[in-house]
Image (cartoon, rainbow, N blue to C red):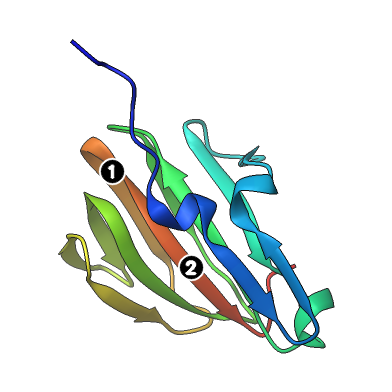
Amino acid sequence: MNTEKKAHPLESACISCLASTCNAENLAWTPHPTFAGVSMKALVTSQTTGGAMSCHLVRVDPQCCLESHIHEQQHELHHVAAGSAKVEVDGRSMQYSPGDLNVIAKGATHRVMAGPEGIMLLAVFTPPLI
């Protein structure tokens, strides 16, 4: 039985931004500095967009949580690439499933509790997070 976890296509996507191109496969996952079981991969940064936006893959391990937090300066768009989660935004609860999109306004408190298979989000920030 093959128990190796298959990578999501976004993890090896070609990223073209203004005058540069790279492969997501060559970018490192970094553990979130505060939340255990959460890792991020910066796909596009302010440096490559002239300060306009940033784009990240966010992976939350099964049953782990991206605890309540606020981005005071950024609007954030979540696109669910894989997995599921229970999400709370300013006290409103919803479920995330693959393909879902959610726009989180700057200053909104939000939390993502991954389901049994975890979740992978494509998160876009404007202005950029980094």
The reply, left or right, for residue 100 in relation to residue 57 is left
Residue 22, quarter of picture: bottom right
Q: Residues within 10 Å of mark 2 (few under 14, many from 20)?
A: many
Q: Position of residue 103 (x, y in %)?
A: 37, 82
Q: Position of residue 59 (x, y in %)?
A: 44, 45
> In the displayed structure, would residue 114 be above or below residue 15?
above
Q: Secondary structure at mark 1?
A: strand
**Inter-mark Cα distance, 2 to 1:** 15 Å
The reply, left or right, for residue 115 in relation to residue 67 is left
Q: Give the residue displayed 40% in from the left and 64% down from the top.
A: 110
The reply, left or right, for residue 118 in relation to residue 39 is left
Q: Please name the residue that numbered disc 2 is placed on.
A: 123
Amino acid type of disc 1? Ala
Q: As drawn, which residue projects farthest toward the top?
A: 1
> In the displayed structure, would residue 47 be above or below residue 66?
below
Mark closer to the chain start, 2 or 1: 1
> In the displayed structure, would residue 10 be above or below residue 61?
below
Asked if one can make out residue 27 in the rendered structure from this viewpoint, the answer is: no
Q: Position of residue 109 (x, y in %)?
A: 43, 68
Quarter of the image with the C terminus is: bottom right
Q: Give the residue displayed 51% in from the left and 31% down from the top.
A: 36
Asked if one can make out residue 121 in the rendered structure from this viewpoint, the answer is: yes
Q: Please name the residue that numbered disc 1 is placed on.
A: 114
